Amino acid sequence: MKSLLTLLVALLPSLALAALNVGDVAPDFSTQATLGGKEFTYHLSVALKDGPVVLYFYPAAFTKGCTIEAHEFAEAMPKYQALGASVIGVSADPIGVLNKFSVSECQSKFPVASDANQAIMKAYDAVLLWKTGYASRTSYVVTPDGKIAYRYSDMNPDKHVENTLAAVRVWADGKK
């Protein structure tokens, strides 16, 4: 037990250094996504040409917290759009599962993407530490210049929409 504790303490500094912070360059990515059950290839760099992107990671489609979060993002889409922002959700779920999730829980209002090999989750330090096959519930706001403007991690889905929307508003107000 003592050796496990020693190992965890030794790993903590490297885990903290891996986190993306405000001002860091957001890793670009392309992946398979779906919107309203229609599959396409999502490119972060292309989406950023139209405005900021709210990139949120969630553990698994059709689980209680992820369903709540998807509903809240869907309901808030007009507010994001009014600020020129888009939203994409990312999980390790296969695209077939996400096709259904995008219609029922995301209400065909924003895309969700499959990160089956977890490359995006790892690049964004969004792998769930105690269950590494899943994403942690982490949200980012990425500005059109490709920088992280906001990061929020909490397994409770309640504040992700409120907080990312506030961060997008701050960004939009700074552009005026």
Image: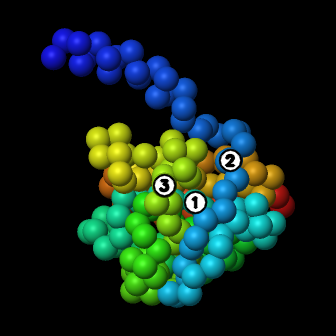
Amino acid type at mark 3: Asn
Residue 118: % across, % down: 48, 52
Mark sitting on residue 26: 2
Helix, strand, or loop for circle 3? Answer: loop
Residue at mark 3: 117
Name which quarter of the figure residue 42 lies in.
bottom right
In the picture, measured across the screen, residue 32 lies left or right of residue 68, that is right
Amino acid type at mark 2: Ala
Cβ–Cβ below 8 Å for labels 2 and 1? Answer: yes
Q: Residue furthest right?
A: 176
Residue 44: % across, % down: 70, 62
Q: CA distance from mark 3 to mark 2?
A: 19 Å
Dot 1 alpha-carbon crowd within 10 angstroms: few under 14, some 14 to 19, many 20 or more? many
Residue 98: % across, % down: 44, 76
Residue at mark 1: 55
Q: Mark 1 or mark 3, which has the lower sequence index?
A: 1
Q: Nearer the viewer, residue 70 or 3?
A: 3
Q: Mark 3 or mark 2, which has the lower sequence index?
A: 2
Which circle, 3 or 2, is nearer the viewer?
Answer: 3
In the picture, measured across the screen, residue 66 lies left or right of residue 138, that is left
- Check the image and report above or below for 101 versus 60: below
- Check the image and report above or below for 75 versus 141: below
Color encoding of the figure: rainbow
